[in-house]
Image (tube, rainbow, N blue to C red):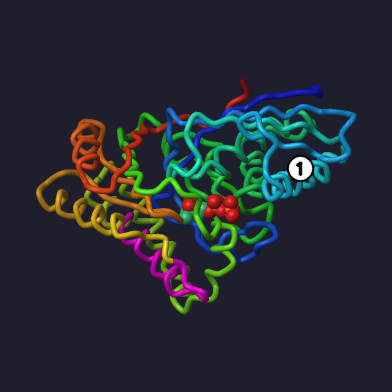
Amino acid sequence: MDVSSATALAHPNIALIKYWGNSDDEWTIPANGSISLTLGGLFTRVQVTVDKALIQDQLFLEGEVASEAAQVRVRQFMDHVRRFSGKQMFCRIESTSNFPRGSGIASSAAAFAAMALAAAKVYGLPTDPCELSRLARLGSGSACRSIYGGFVEWIAGIDHQSSYAIPLAPKDYWDLVDCVAVVSTEHKAVSSREGHRLAKTSPLQPCRVQTASQRIERCRRAILERDFGQLAQVVELDSNLMHSVMMTSQPPLFYWRGETLIIMEEVRRWRNQGQPVCYTVDAGPNVHVLTLAAHAEWVREKLSQIAGVKGVIVAAPGEGAVLV
Ligand code: DP6
């Protein structure tokens, strides 16, 4: 049955094996598969409401009319929803998050995962996770992973039908924790969207893409065997490879700051001393430090003592997208 309004909630995710660059930008078909952990505690709630008076969709972020760039991105997503459903109505879309923008945790994954679910409900589209994952991907690539909780793999595929995420292990499978060391809350100068387009200009991208399936395999095995040592090796390698591509694109993208490098070095030092820790860095300067739940408080304390660290956000594995 069609409804005129639906609200859904989804969590962000941190990529353990990164998505960077597309084989098809228009349909967000990634150049390589990726693996992520959905982050609990942090969420974005999206309400989609049909409004017959509207002649285009209206997006509100935290109760305020969103920027033109954000409106355009959401309208393009909703155009896909209209095309798939054959229904032409426009909607008011209200999005609120319990974590700040610029906190080093991408809000677009949680927002488009929640929007896909709420919009599918309103437009009468299928709401099985595989279909939702495909739909969410059209809003933001990494959003296709936030449809599921716990440990998730995005199968790259070659077209819309074959590119979607699948669950690898539920959230309680392994008590990993992400401690995000926030060194900057500034909005990033170059968006992920722009970065994905630049990836193919790096001479290192073909090598990164060709070897991605080996890292996917190693990462999947490390998760399933709960082998932190193996996970640490492959997660840091994959993050370093993505940043090597970023730094060698035309024009080059340098997301790291001095503090980013200092934290990465500290994490390696702690690991050499026997702590189960490793780092991964997305398209920004903040450092995601992964550890086991029993060590999270120690890691949070140590990170907050580093000069330049403005705060530490601690997130344990979370659930997939749900209607509320
Ligand atoms: C570095 O999914 O945010 O976080 O599709 O343009 O929204 P868009 O890109 P997005 O890119 C994520 C890039 C990354 C790595 C990852 O999450 O896999």
Where residue 103 sits in the image (x, y, percent)?
A: 43, 42
Where residue 23 sits in the image (x, y, percent)?
A: 61, 66
Q: Quadrant of residue 50?
A: top right
Q: Which sits in the foreground, 160 or 261?
A: 261
Q: Which sits in the foreground, 202 or 2?
A: 202
Kind of element beneath mark 1: helix
Quadrant of the frame with the N terminus: top right
Is 296 displayed left or right of 6 in the figure? left
| Residue drawn where x is 67% and y is 58% of the image | 159
Count of numbered marks:
1
Is 260 displayed left or right of 193 in the figure? left
| Residue drawn where x is 68% and y is 27% of the image | 47
Circle 1 Cα neighbour tier, 10 Å, few/some/many (<14 / 14–19 / ≥20): many
- Please say whether residue 188 is one of the residues in the magenta stretch: no
Specify the amino acid type for callout 1: Met
| Residue drawn where x is 31% and y is 39% of the image | 179
Magenta extent: 235-253
Dominant secondary structure, magenta: helix
The answer to whether residue 321 shows anywhere in this view is no
94 in relation to 36, above or below: above
The residue most toward the left is: 273
The answer to whether residue 196 shows anywhere in this view is yes
Residue ID for mark 1 = 78
**Ligand 1 within 8 A of label 1's CB?**
no
28 in relation to 47, above or below: below
Where residue 19 sits in the image (x, y, percent)?
A: 49, 57
Is 314 displayed left or right of 127 in the figure? left
279 in relation to 97, above or below: below
